[in-house]
Amino acid sequence: MVEIAEGNGEPEEMVELPQKKYYRQRAHANPMSDHDIEYPVSPDQ
C-alpha cells in the first residue's frame, strides 16, 4: 500500500499498487513465428 499525502503531512488515502503478476507477459507476440508447421525439405515434396 502507498500513502498519498496532500502536503500537510497526513495520509489522505491508501492506494494499492498493481501487482507484477497482473502485468502482461510480453509486449508483442509474433504469430508468424509462434507455430508448429512442418516444412518440406525441398519444394518437390
Image (spheres, grey):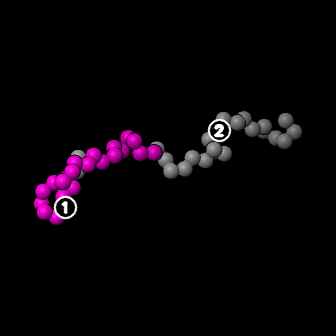
Residue under the point 50% across and 50% down: 27
- Image quarter for residue 21? top left
The residue type indicated by label 1 comes to Glu
**Residue 5, placed above or below residue 26:** below
Could you tell me which secondary element the residue under label 1 belongs to? loop
- The residue that mark 2 highlights is 35
Figure disc tally:
2
Image quarter where the C terminus lies is top right
**Residue 32, placed above or below residue 36:** below
Toward the viewer: 44 or 32? 32
Which label lies toward us, 2 or 1?
1
Residue neighbourhood size for the residue with mark 1, other residues' Cα within 10 Å, grouped as few (<14), some (14–19), many (≥20): few
Q: Residue furthest bottom?
A: 7
Residue 39 in the image: x percent, y percent? 75, 38
Residue 16 in the image: x percent, y percent? 27, 46
- The residue that mark 1 highlights is 6
Between disc 2 and disc 1, whose residue precedes?
Answer: 1
- Image quarter for residue 38? top right
The residue type indicated by label 2 comes to His
Residue 35 in the image: x percent, y percent? 65, 38
Using residue 4 as the reference point, say whether residue 25 is left or right of it.
Answer: right
Residue 34 in the image: x percent, y percent? 62, 41
For residue 4: magenta? yes
